[in-house]
Structure formats: C-alpha cells, structure tokens
Amino acid sequence: MSDQPTEDLFRWGNWEPVIGVEVHVQLATNSKIFSNSPTSYGAEPNSQANVIDLGMPGVLPVLNEGAVRMAITFGLAIGAQLNRLSIFDRKNYFYPDLPKGYQISQFETPIVGAGELTFSMDDGSERTINITRAHLEEDAGKSVHDMFPGSSGIDLNRTGTPLLEVVSEPELCSPAEASAYFRALHGLVKSLRICDGNLNEGSMRCDCNVSIRPRGQQELGERTEIKNVNSFRFVERAIETEIARQIEVLEGGGNIRRETRLYDPDRDETRSMRGKELSDDYRYFPDPDLLPLVLDETMIEEMRSKLPELPIAKRARFVTNLGLSEYDADMLTRDPDVAAYFETAAQHAGDTKVAANWVNGDVAAALNRADLAVADSPVDAITLGALLQRISDGTVSGKIAKTLFEALWGTPTRTTDVSAALKRIDALIDERGLKQVSDSSELQGLVDQVLADNPDQVAQFRAGKEKVLGFFVGQIMKSTQGKANPGQLNGLLREALKP
Amino acid sequence: MSEINMEKLTRLAHLQLSDAEQTAARADLEAIIGMIDTFNAAEVGDTAPMSHPLDLHARLRADIATADITRETYQALAPSAENGLYLVPQVIDSE
C-alpha cells in the first residue's frame, strides 16, 4: 500500500484546497445526554421531550453514563488522549429549536483529545488524518417551515440527544479524501456500536470547512463551512463545488467571506446561509449546572477490554489470513454489518474468495437495487454460505447459483442452522432440475454432438482461433440450460479438439 | 473589547433597543467591561483555572429512559401548538 494519493491533486491549477471536517455522531444511547427521555427515532412530535429537554426553569441536567462510556470507547479506538477531567460549557445562541437559549457542549476541555484515524482510499493508498478532539454535546430540535403559514413548527424530540462531535485537523487535501475519511469514521463508530450510522435519519452529519490557498503558501485562506451534509457522495460533491466557487471568486478579484453555506444536491451548488459567528459570539462559559466530568480509570480499562476488532485490523486480517485482495478486504470492512455477513457466509461456503466475490458483487447489487441494508437481506448469511457450498462441492455451477440466489431472494427466511439451509437449497435444486451435469460420459456425449454439428468452428479452432471454444461451451450450456459442469466441460472440449 | 458594537450585540441577543435604551445599555456594558479589566489585572499565573466553585465532580445517571412525558400538559403551557408541534414566528434557515 502506498501513502501517496494517486488522484490528480493538480486539477485546481495553482490553487490548493485545505479541508477540515467536523462530524456530529449521534450516540446510540437509550436516553438523552442530560435527561431520562427516550431517544428513539420517528416518534410522535414532542412525545420524547421532558421538562429538561424543554428548558423549563428550575430543572437540572444529569449526565448520562452511557454517553460517557461511548465517548471513551471512541477515544480509545483512535488512540486519543482521554482527558481525565473535562468541562461542560454553555454555547449561547438563539434559535427556536434550542429552547434554553444555549447548547450544552464542551469548549476548552473536551473529553477526547488528539488522536488519529487511518483509512484507505479507493485506489488502495492509505491516509492517516489527525483528529483534533471529540467532545460531548446535546443535539437541538427540528424546525418545520412549510406546514403553517407565518409560523414555524418545532419538534423537540431530538433535543438533548447525545452527540459526539469529532473534529479533524485541516489536513484533508481533496473532496475524495474528505469523503473517504467520513466513510471510515462511519465504519468505525458502527463497529464500536456507539452509533447506528443511519445517514438518512441524520445519525451522522458532516460539516465541511473548506478554504483554498495558492499552492505552496503556508498561510490558510478564509474558510467557509458547509453544514449538515449527510452522505458520502454529497460530501465529495459539496466540497468539489465549493472549491470551484472559491476559485472563481478569488480569480474574479473577490474575497471569500467567512460564512455558513448549505449544499443543494439538486442544483449541485452551495448557498450562503448566514455570516459565521466567531467563537466569541457564542459567549462560551462553564455550565454552572454541571460539575466537571472526571473519568474513572476503572471505567476506561473496562471500555478498553470491550473494544471490538477495529475495521483497519479486520481488513489486515482478511488480507493476511483469508488471502483476500486489498480491494475486497476494504470493501468488506467498510461496514461492520457487511463484514459480519461475509464472515458467516465464508465460514460455510468452502471458498473464502468466492464468498468475498458474492458479497461484494451479487449480494451488494441486489441490496442496492432493493435499497436494503445487509442486516435486512432476504438471503441471510448462513443461507448464502450454504448456497456457495453447493458451488464448491460441484452440485451447481456459479451461473445456476445466481438463479438459485434469485429464488432464495424472493422467498426470504431467517435461519441459524446451515443444515436446514442446505436442505432448503437442495430441495430447490431438485424441484427446478438445476443439478449440475458432472457425469463424464454424459458430458462427453454432448461434446461429441456439438463438434459433429459444427465442423466449420472445429476447423477454425484447430487453425488457432481459441475464442471459438467459448462458442462450443455456450452451445452445450444452452442445451443443458446452464447445468453442464464448466470446468469438466472445458477439459473435455480441449481434449476432443486436439488435432 | 476596545469598542462596544451595539448593533452586533443586539443582533446576537435578538433584542430590539431604542436609541435611549442602547445608550443606557452601552453605559452598563462599559461598566461591566471596566470590572473585567480589573479582573484581568489580577495576578493569577500560579492559579489553575476553575470551572466550578465546588470541589466535586459530576455524578452520572444510568442510561435508562424512564421519563413519563405527557405532551398535552407541556403544550397547554405553550403560547401556540398544533399537530403536536410548538408554533413560533416563522424562522427560515437562509437569509
């Protein structure tokens, strides 16, 4: 693996982008960060906001231990310094979805200090990005602007949901790199089981700080912040389009204004939201309602002992122990649910590489078409493993297996018993007459017949036109409805075609 | 802060002040800033920053959702609510 990016970083001419990313990770706690309200998504508006979330006078926040444990887990996973004492501060601003008039956050002393995240790019190169800090804070509510003329509707269910805001150093040097970083962070927090990673529901939201400077200049240019981007592709597109805009402004003699912008995917452009406040404007000060958070060494060691295998270690294991390519291993470890699905399937498949090809190929494509997560796959991992076992033991060909996969996809079941899955697949093979023809004499008969029927093609092959072999295979596959054992068939054909 | 920018402060605080009120508020703020200057003059080099006056640390709550939430009770206190949402004067994200 190389640590040198192979993408064209000179496509912006004399300009060099500098990108930093802040990701808000919604922590998968049962209750809110400072109250005992539930956090489940999709509940009736305002049915999950109690007096603390509503900012009623006289109430006091009490910190959720679950959120603290998750922050510690994250800090350990990125090799960060964990601050044994951290402080909660008030970040003051006015917006109706923030009923207290301030957000409880951590400013000067966050729970997680400097760490780093290593990830691979699509071209196989590897990058390590420094993470400045990660701090705990509460989420705000949601505003609905288009339901009531002259009014905005406020839903405070999300208010107080715990967030871990992960801030990178401005070290990302391209939109693709920023997107890969976001994807790696997504894979990491899902692996750690501290976030459900559901981007559609806003479980991870990315703010991208973008500036450009003349290549070689040390001093950073003025930056803009693109708020709340929630897909890997949009992160890449939003930054790409913002870099282009900034180049156009500067080359036209203008100045970049520090501001918050929104990305509009329909128009593929960023638009100004408001002038960006500086941190002074938020009048941060320690929250007198919350005592300093002191981390207990016992709790830290407990969380360290519970750390799961991290995506980067899993990827290395897939390459070293399972013999997978870097590409396959990377694809399989981007999402821990996919990795788990693959490992279960591979355990029963009899051939790890075939399992990797299927999970990255047919299964991924089918899930994509149906817009399903792997956890909801109609063909569970054990059933897939059983199906692949029938390829490796020669019962069916890879092509027939695809037909069987479609049939299994259409009749979803869940099993934890590979014998039951094999039984189901065998019944399907018998019922549809899909068993592979591996009988040598039967195949020999088919070979003799196809050669006798096609003397011109036989002559072409013997004259050196190797491609014609595919024609004979195709003819026999057609007559057997794809059931001829392809390996055996190739051998018999070559033997019979010898001059 | 060398000069008080009343326009910016009133915008951040979402306050609409008359000229007379602004003059009065400016005088108050200047007095407050004067006091902060006195604080700043204090020698605190050997003193660790303090975020809380009590020598205690946060107690943690178990991560269990036990809240008994009666939306109707809270919404009865609100100036306006409809379809389960609290209604406020129109706010939009873009300027």
Image (tube, helix red, strand yellow):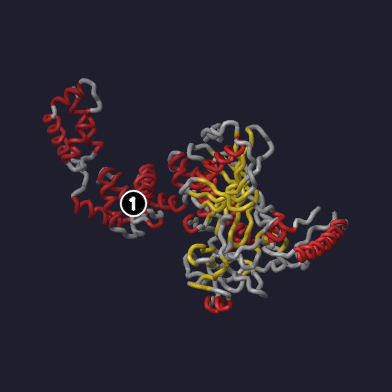
User: Height in image: A305 above or below A327?
Assistant: below
User: Height in image: A92 above or below B68?
Assistant: above
Q: On the rendered image, what quadrant is the C terminus of chain A found in?
A: top left
User: Height in image: A407 above or below A451?
Assistant: below
Residue A185 can be seen, yes or no: yes
Q: How many labels does the image show?
A: 1
Amino acid at pointer 1: Leu
The location of residue A189, given as percent across then percent down, is 53, 54
Q: In this view, does A441 lie to the left or right of A36?
A: left
Q: Viewer-proximal residue, B43 or A340?
A: B43
Q: Mark 1 sits on what residue?
A: A384
> Dividing the picture into quarters, in which one does residue A129 lie?
top right
* Residue at screen point 56% across, 35% down: A3
The location of residue A441, given as percent across then percent down, is 15, 37
Q: Mark 1 — on which chain does it sit?
A: A
- Give the farthest residue toward the front: B19
* Residue at screen point 50% across, 49% down: A264
Q: Viewer-proximal residue, A359 or A248?
A: A248
The location of residue A225, given as percent across then percent down, is 60, 49
The location of residue A194, given as percent across then percent down, is 54, 58
Q: Mark 1 falls on what kind of element? A: helix
* Residue at screen point 32% across, 51% down: A386
> Dividing the picture into quarters, in which one does residue A160 lie?
bottom right
Residue A207 can be seen, yes or no: no
User: Height in image: A411 above or below A493?
Assistant: below
Disc 1: CA contacts within 10 A as few (<14), some (14-19) or many (>=20): many
